[in-house]
Each structure stands twice: as structure tokens, then as C-alpha cells.
């Protein structure tokens, strides 16, 4: 929004999420600079405290909300995404892959991770580059090159990527918003 003035100037404001010190204050970043300002001491009731949580702000305080959507509940999802589940409705997949570049082929498919998968962790050893391709249920394809550490977004999915000198680590909490092919 550009209708809020700060120190005599109007700015285009972007929301700042996940402030560990005060998740229920309204903090915004000016689009054209690094200026971050608290524009209000509290957000509207019902606003989520953190983007990856059901917890919500009520009267300026973060209140716990369980996966059963009950205020004050400590119900948690299991690794399969089932509220109060025991983890028995899905399976853990582990594996190892050794690159075998065929003649003239510059990239290999390392793994295909299906839609709705959760808690993905990939470790790629050696100096390499990582490509992620996605294909939605509607057949729409997208591609992403991971070249520096940070958070990336693809098909409503957040990917946490860490590039180290001897390996790369890709973590995705999920659920994945499409089939992902890692190359």
C-alpha cells in the first residue's frame, strides 16, 4: 500500500513476516529501500503469527492453534500430514545416487519427488549445480536453478537451499505443490 506516510514520505510497503521478537506487530518494509518500520503495535485478530504455523494473533498476542484448528490445542501433524497421526499412513524413502554423465549429456535426473510429498531432505556432494523442475497436475511445467543459499518458491512450495563448499543441501517441509524433478 502507498497510502501510509512515514517521516513525511509515502512509500510502497511490503509486509514483514516471521518476526521472532514480536510476530503480532504490523511491520512493513519500504519497497524502494531497506527501511523496516512498525506501522502498528498489533495486527488484526486472526492474523497468523508465522507463515508456516496455524498460531494466530489475538489482541496483539500470539495464541497457539493446533492442527485441529482449536485455539489452545497442542495437536500436531505427523510426518504424513495427519493431525494427531502416528506416522503410519506414509513411508520414508531413502536412497543414494551416483552421477553417470552419458556422452554429451550435461545433466542427470537425480530423483523425482511426487506431489504432496513432505519433509524432503537432499544432500548432493561435490561442487555441482542444482535444477528443480516442477510439473503440476494440469501439466504446467516450471524450472528453477538453485545457485546460492536461500529460500526459493516454486508451485506454492518453499525450498530451503544451502550451498556449501563440499555439498548442497535442499530441504522442503512440504507438502509439494507439484511433482518435482531434481537434476
Image (spheres, grey):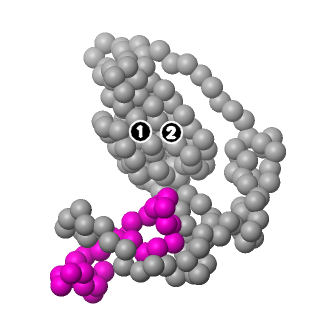
Q: Percent x, y for residue 26? A: 43, 75
In the drawing, does residue 66 fall left or right of residue 110? Answer: right
Q: Marks 1 and 2, how far apart in space? A: 6 Å
Can you say whether 20 is above or below 183 in the image? Answer: below
Comparing 130 with 161, the one in front is 161
Label 1 crowd bin: few (<14), some (14–19), many (20+), radius 10 Å? many
Residue toward you, 91 or 119: 119
Say which residue appears at 51% left-offset and 30% top-offset: 122
Q: Residue at (45%, 45%) from the top-left corner? A: 159
The earlier-in-sequence mark between 1 and 2 is: 1
The residue at 53%/62% (across/down) is 50
Q: Dot 2: what SS?
A: strand
Q: Main secondary structure of the magenta part?
A: loop
Residue 68 showing in the rendered view: no
Q: Percent from the top left, x then y, of residue 179? A: 52, 44
From this viewpoint, is residue 123 visible?
yes
Q: Which residues are magenta?
A: 1-28
Q: Which quadrant of the figure contains the N terminus?
A: bottom left
Q: Tags 1 and 2 in contact by the CB under 8 Å rule?
A: yes
Note whether 56 is above or below 112 in the view shown.
Answer: below
Q: Secondary structure at mark 1?
A: strand
Residue 108 figure quarter:
top left
Task: Check the picture and name the quadrant holding the C terminus.
Answer: top left
Residue 19 placement, left or right of 28: right
| Image mark for residue 71 | none
Residue underneath mark 2: 171
Whether residue 14 is situated above or below residue 162 in the rendered picture? below
Residue depicted at x 37% and y 43%: 150
> Does the magenta-highlighted stretch encompass residue 35?
no
Magenta stretch: residue 13 in it?
yes
Q: Which residue is mark 1?
A: 161
Of 13 and 98, the residue lying toward us? 13
Amino acid at each position: 500500500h502507498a497510502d501510509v506516510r512515514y517521516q513525511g514520505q509515502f512509500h510502497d510497503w511490503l509486509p514483514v513476516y516471521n518476526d521472532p521478537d514480536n510476530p503480532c506487530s504490523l511491520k512493513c518494509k519500504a519497497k524502494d529501500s531497506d527501511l523496516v518500520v512498525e506501522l502498528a503495535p498489533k495486527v488484526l485478530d486472526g492474523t497468523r503469527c508465522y507463515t508456516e504455523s496455524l498460531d494466530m494473533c489475538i489482541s496483539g498476542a500470539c495464541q497457539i492453534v493446533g492442527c485441529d484448528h482449536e485455539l489452545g490445542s497442542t495437536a500436531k501433524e505427523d510426518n504424513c500430514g495427519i493431525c494427531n497421526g502416528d506416522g503410519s499412513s506414509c513411508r520414508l524413502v531413502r536412497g543414494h545416487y551416483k552421477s553417470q554423465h552419458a556422452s554429451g549429456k550435461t545433466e542427470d535426473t537425480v530423483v523425482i519427488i511426487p506431489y504432496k510429498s513432505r519433509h524432503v531432505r537432499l544432500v548432493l556432494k561435490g561442487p555441482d549445480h542444482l535444477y528443480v523442475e516442477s510439473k503440476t497436475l494440469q501439466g504446467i511445467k516450471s524450472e528453477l536453478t538453485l545457485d546460492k543459499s536461500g529460500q526459493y518458491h516454486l508451485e506454492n512450495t518453499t525450498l530451503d537451499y544451502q550451498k556449501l563448499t563440499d555439498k548442497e543441501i535442499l530441504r522442503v517441509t512440504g507438502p509439494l505443490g507439484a511433482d518435482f524433478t531434481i537434476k
